[in-house]
Image (spheres, helix red, strand yellow):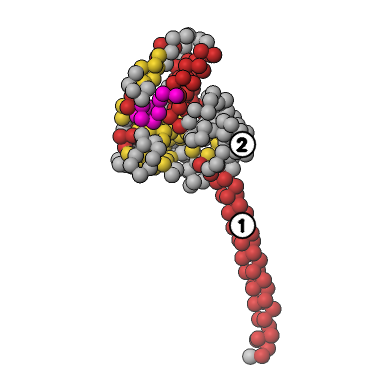
Amino acid sequence: MQILSRTFAPSKTKTMKKVLKVIGVLFMLGIVGVGIVWWYSSTSNPWNAKTVGDISAPVGYTRVEGGYAEFMRSLPLKKRGSKVQFYTGGDAQFQWLSTGVIDLPMLSDSEQCADMTMRLRAEYLFNQGRYSEIKFRDVNGNTLRYHDGGSRKALEKFLKNAYGVCSTFSVNRETEPRPINEVQPGDVLVYPARKLEGMGHALIVIDVARKGNQVAIMCAEGNTPARELHIVRNHNPIENPWFFFDGDENTLWVSVFHFRKNELRHY
């Protein structure tokens, strides 16, 4: 028995060394994997995409077509690692809500959440030469109309004035609800001030992809105090920046924001 023990001891030692090596390699791979996930889930524009459209659609999903969709996908993005900036300068708080900064110079310190949804709608219509369709209702129900054709300076002046008299309340009131399974780029998720929450909020849908009855959306937001428009982060790094719905949800969760199903709206 002693001879057998001496014969097999070196073999057992070699096996143990191999096992420890494998465990060590797996441990290191785990650390690397965690590091990659952490980097991806905390870095702005981790894809280093040039435009919204350069971000891949979810696997198995097909992007919707249309002029508004193409306009949204053409929006330029700031380079990887760019942080959301306040209008007044400096890094905005809540960087973790953003997964990419849209390179769209701000117009004023009043350009916040609802205002950014209005801005993108106006920019699209202006880009299309559909000047007479650029209009919004203020909080008192009055219609504000743009009258100055292709003048960029006039458009910006019109928007700055509109920001001062419009809000999540007015955007919610002048739009119509749309079911989530019919969502389109340019739709807004918006609620006015709620009890116990103080302020309303608004996001704009900047891309949509479908797979059968399922839908994936990408959203952008401004916020208060005024800061750059940015893509909302999905904190599931596998799904980011898309949010997925089956069509029968009563509550629509986009990151930390929740909307009732009738708060997905369109002009």
How far is mark 2 from mark 1, CA to CA?
33 Å
User: x, y (%) of residue 30?
Assistant: 59, 58
Q: Quadrant of the N terminus?
A: bottom right
Magenta stretch in the rendered image? 164-172
Side of 168 where 248 appears, left or right: left
Residue 228: in sight, yes or no?
yes
The residue carrying mark 2 is 90
Return the mark for residue 101. Answer: none
| Camera-side residue of 63 and 82 | 82
User: x, y (%) of residue 238?
Assistant: 50, 45
User: x, y (%) of residue 187?
Assistant: 39, 28
Residue drawn at x 49%, y 38% is: 232
User: x, y (%) of residue 69?
Assistant: 45, 25
Q: Which numbered disc, 2 or 1, marks the residue that appears first in the sequence?
A: 1
Return the mark for residue 31. Answer: 1
Task: Determine the residue located farthest toward the bottom in the rendered image.
Answer: 1
| Camera-side residue of 37 and 157 | 157
